[in-house]
Each structure stands twice: as structure tokens, then as C-alpha cells.
Image (cartoon, rainbow, N blue to C red):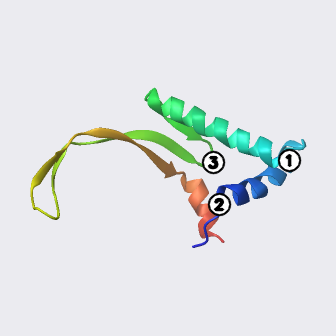
Amino acid sequence: MISVDRKAFRKKLAPKLSRALDFDISEDKCAKFLEVLRDTVQESLSNDEEVNLIGFGKFEMQKRAARTARNPRTGEAIEIPSKSVPKFKFFDSFTKGIDDK
């Protein structure tokens, strides 16, 4: 698997956004767009709202139950409290587009 870093992703995304919107978007503006998107998703999730990005996927909070675990060094039982964690699920339409290639 090849990993694309943040700068390389912006470099790929900026010209595609420019063409799709028929508006020149610099890499810096693209980075700002991604920051705003991230902040908006975080804000919605912190308000316990689902975020659906049509044709892409869904962000939601998932509740993890409290559990007992073991310290691997000592074998001592450790209580891990319940917590909510962000979860992302791709829509089928997105995954089908990947499987076809």
C-alpha cells in the first residue's frame, strides 16, 4: 500500500477541485478547505450528530463498553471505562468504485 502524505494529497486535490468548480483553487486554499471540513465533522460528532458525506461515507460516534483487561507484564486486572470513539464507514457506492479498478 502506498501512503499519500497531506501535502501530496493537497497537490492532487487542488487541481481537481479547480476543474470541478470552474474556479482556481490554490493548494493553500485546498488545505484550508480540508481543515474546515475536519473541524466541522469534529464539531458535529462532539454534538453527537452523524455526518453523511453522500457518495463517500458516514462519520458517527460509537460507544465502547467498559471492560476488564490484563496488564501483560504483571497479569494484574485493569478496569477500562466506557467511552465514545469516532467511527467511519464507507458507503457501498464508494467501495464498489475501488473494487472495479
- Name the secondary structure under disc 2: loop
Answer with mark 1 or mark 3, whichever residue precedes in sequence. Answer: 1
Mark 1 surroundings: few (<14), some (14-19) or many (≥20) residues within 10 A: some
Give the percent coordinates (x, y) of residue 28.
78, 44
Q: Is residue 40 left or right of residue 14?
A: left
The quarter holding residue 37 reads: top right
Q: Earlier in the sequence, mark 2 or mark 1?
A: 2
Label 2: how many residues lie within 10 Å, few (<14), some (14-19) or many (20+)?
A: few
* Pointer 3 residue: 55
Type of amino acid under label 2? Asp
The N terminus, quarter of image: bottom right
Residue at 65% in and 60% down: 5
Q: Which residue is denoted by mark 2 in the rendering?
A: 5
| Label 2 vs label 1, nearer the camera | 2
The residue identified by callout 1 is: 18
Density class for disc 3 (Cα within 10 Å; few <14, some 14-19, many ≥20) is few
Find the residue positioned furthest to the front: 73
